[in-house]
Amino acid sequence: MRKRLDWLDIGKGLGMLLVMLGHADIPALLKTYIYTFHMPLFFFLSGYLYNKDKFPNLKVFLIRRTKSLILPYLSFSLIAYLWFLLLNHLGLVSYENNLFTPLIGSLIAIRKSIWTVHTGALWFVACLFCTELLFYFIAKMGRTKLTIGILLLVSSAAGCIYNKTVGQPLPWNLDVALISVGFYGGGYLYKEYNKRFEIFNHLKTFVLLFIVNILIGYLNYALTGERVDFYNSSLGNIGLFYLSAFSGIGAFVILIKHLKKNRFLQYIGKNSFIYLAFHQKIVFFIFSLMIQKSVLNIETISDYPIVEGLIYTLITVVILIPAVYAINHYFPFMLGKTTRKGSRELSLSTNI
């Protein structure tokens, strides 16, 4: 089973590198390209791993997902909160509200608000839980794949309408989940029809989808002035958004299926949860602070943002290796696991 899904670990690893690179100070055009598909990609890969036979009823689903998603989310949110308190005490961040607000905010999980100033990219985990919960109900109601597809379209349409008419983040990022469930379900249906899709698994299709992704993605940005960004509720033109996202996902899947086994990417993929939790608000913040205080002198590369972004990303991967080791071996409960062996398997897609 693991060998057959090596490409998924590689995909999650490469996808996480794109997430970290996207959070660095890189050229706007490159960031625009990455954002066209990198978040939809993670929902797609998670959906590929969904197995409805593992969830005979809602109680089983909630118990398993609370253990694999909610408990890790709350564990890492607590660490993020303690880090936030330290920074506030040292005068490195400015926060005018009650300091207990972010602690309660982890439970409310409304991104881009005073409630979640500390959690950073962890918004994705809360959103993934709601996305999986939505898909659980869709899979239960849809007795055929056609019905599931129709329900996914209905949910996506509802999410897009809300996004364009209201646009305010909802608790646990339910507003994004209404949209992301379409990508999650897309991953599930891709697995169900995998043999049919294999005829497109060649480099010519990759080139075509890659070109479509770039052209449509930049066209969306040029016409609307909006860069696709789930966190900021920004999609641009809905039709162009979906076309660019799915073409990007398609190109990416073909690419990672043609890559040889890569232990570096698989390592990041298997530990993607930890990298997601720590890279933005902790490691990147420390980098920025050290540069600001002239502890790090990178003036020679500051004129080359892409190089600086790559250095940020690669150094982060290395710096967090001790944290990955410590959490997997000594604090597996933070990952919703009770054994060291089990913790080695946890990543952002926890459906294996």
Image (spheres, rainbow, N blue to C red):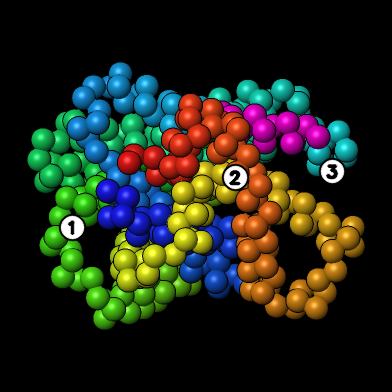
| Type of amino acid at the residue the image marks with label 1 | Asn
Residue 39 seen from this side: no
Q: Position of residue 316 (x, y in %)?
A: 66, 57
Q: Nearer the viewer, mark 1 or mark 3?
A: 1
| Type of amino acid at the residue the image marks with label 2 | Val
Side of 179 relative to 118 (left or right): left
Label pair 1/2, CB-CB below 8 angstroms? no
Gap between marks 3 and 2, in whole Å? Answer: 26 Å
Side of 330 relative to 350 (left or right): right
Q: Residue at x 73, y 31 (%)?
A: 82
Q: Residue at x 34, y 39 (%)?
A: 351
Earlier sequence position, callout 1 versus callout 3: 3
Q: Secondary structure at mark 2?
A: helix
Closer to the camera in the image, 215 or 314: 314
Please tell me whether the stretch drawn in magenta is mainly helix, strand or loop.
helix
Closer to the camera in the image, 93 or 301: 301
In the displayed structure, would residue 141 be above or below residue 38? above
Label pair 3/2, CB-CB below 8 angstroms? no
Dot 3: within a 10 Å radius of its alpha carbon, few (fewer than 14), some, or many (20 or more) residues?
Answer: few
Residue 225 is tagged as none
The residue segment tinted magenta is 74-86
Q: Position of residue 64 (x, y in %)?
A: 37, 26
Residue 324 is tagged as 2
Dot 1: within a 10 Å radius of its alpha carbon, few (fewer than 14), some, or many (20 or more) residues?
Answer: few
State the residue lying farthest toward the top.
Answer: 59
Earlier sequence position, callout 3 versus callout 2: 3
Earlier sequence position, callout 1 versus callout 2: 1
Quadrant in which residue 313 is drawn:
bottom right
Side of 114 relative to 297 (left or right): left
Residue 194 is tagged as 1
Closer to the camera in the image, 258 or 24: 258
